[in-house]
Image: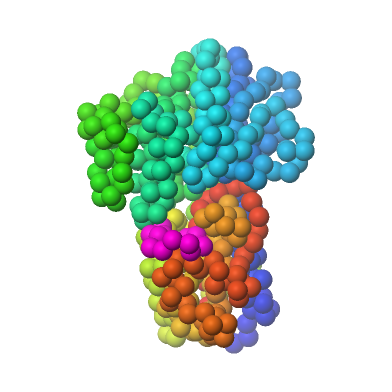
Amino acid sequence: MSLPACFDDPRALLRHLLEVAIARAQPERCLQGRLPPVPRGRTLVLGAGKAGGAMAAAVDALWPKDAPLSGLVVTRYGHVPPAYRASPGRIEVVEAAHPVPDAAGQAAAQRIMELTRGLTADDLVLCLISGGGSALLSAPAPGLSLQDKQNINRALLKSGASIDEMNCVRKHLSALKGGRLAALCAPARVVTLVISDVPGDDPSVIASGPTVPDATTCAEALAIVRRYGIALPAGIESAWARGELETPKPGDPIFEGHEVHLIATPQQALEAAAEAAQALGVQAYILSDEIEGESRVVGQVHAALARQVARRNQPFARPCVLLSGGETTVTVRSAGGRGGRATEFLLGTALALQGQPGVYVLAADTDGIDGVEDNAGAIVTPDTLARGQALGLNATEVLDRNDAYRYFEALGDLVITGPTYTNVNDFRAILVA
């Protein structure tokens, strides 16, 4: 059987699928036709997330030029689209740190709280929310300092906790998350536009849901920090035990008349990649957009499926592309290692594949940043382990050090996109030729 011409360069095919997935989630595309009508009063735009700069730019371009528009959105350092940075519009965009909050994020959160003062029932608050907002919108609850939040955030990131667990804790340490921003906006109407970066697309989890009801509790947050051995500042544990930092719950009248709209999701990005593969003559299968778990273990499972396809044409016939998304986790076992979810997944995949002929794998974070590094992800080829060995690199030892970035850097196999100005979480594509 003759293979499509795209198999002459598997790396290029995989990069193309990533680019298509990212393009599908660009705010300028997915905000078309999604903005609410101009209100009788003023329109205030508030938001946070890695896609925040691009979302603000898109809203500014789409909103009627003769209608009042103002606001403040916070995004990650370096994630303001160049055109909007060069020529700012009516919505101010500021930058702060991610994944560990900093003083700039705290200052932005304070300004957002101040902007909600004086809103009326005739006003519209347009909230632009995307992944990363939990760290970027840092407003410590009473009894907490910024340093406290930084310490807890670092501990959560190293613990292997899921995104749902991390955001449950964050909601109960914040003056804005878990629906509290919506409470501050009363009596204005609130319309929230969301780009999802979490498995299941639950708006209450994305950026810790600043404008939506929170069904989680202080008791659940307390159980999570105890499960992972995360230290809390004096007074917070007892406050949680008494329910003193509880969030607004479903059914609370403060959410009456509010709207929440998902404008881009991981599933949509995967579907766009699948269509692009099929247009090139390669059958594509979406495994799931909700895969979670330890990155290296998820890599082993993906490798087992790829080997079954390569060796037995089960459960799919080759040639084909297997696509998946979600949010895996990394339990940090060694200080000094470099890497994120994508490279950790890939090294686990490579070790399990053991040089399986005809299998090529790309994994990347769709925001363009794998963890805190300069790469979006990397690529595994059938000779990944052999080339590493030739350079004196033991892949198992590297993985044990959580140092996958340096492994793929040495091989020249990092995928570097720069900031993409969106964020629909993990993207994984396995080509079985």
* Quadrant including the C terminus: bottom right
Q: Residue at x 67, y 19 (%)?
A: 68
- Left or right: where does residue 154 sit relative to residue 226? right
Q: Give residue 240's position: percent from left, percent from top.
A: 26, 32
**Of the pair 65 and 243, the residue shown nearer to us:** 243
State whether residue 273 appears in this view: no
Q: Quadrant of residue 405?
A: bottom right
Q: Give residue 376's position: percent from left, percent from top.
A: 59, 59
Is 298 a magenta residue?
no
Q: Main secondary structure of the magenta part?
A: loop
Q: Quadrant of residue 61?
A: top right
Q: Give residue 243's position: percent from left, percent from top.
A: 25, 29
Q: Residue at x 53, y 45 (%)?
A: 98
State whether residue 111 appears in this view: yes
Q: Residue at x 52, y 38 (%)?
A: 102
Is 337 a magenta residue?
yes
The number of numbered discs placed on residues in the rendered structure image is 0
- Rendered position, 308 above or below 143: below
Which scheme is used to colour this image of the protein? Answer: rainbow
Stretch of the chain drawn in magenta: 329-341
> As drawn, which residue projects farthest toward the right?
87
Q: Residue at x 59, y 87 (%)?
A: 1
**Of the pair 394 and 135, the residue shown nearer to us:** 394
- Rendered position, 101 above or below 322: above
Q: Give residue 337's position: percent from left, percent from top.
A: 48, 64
**Of the pair 111 and 427, the residue shown nearer to us:** 111
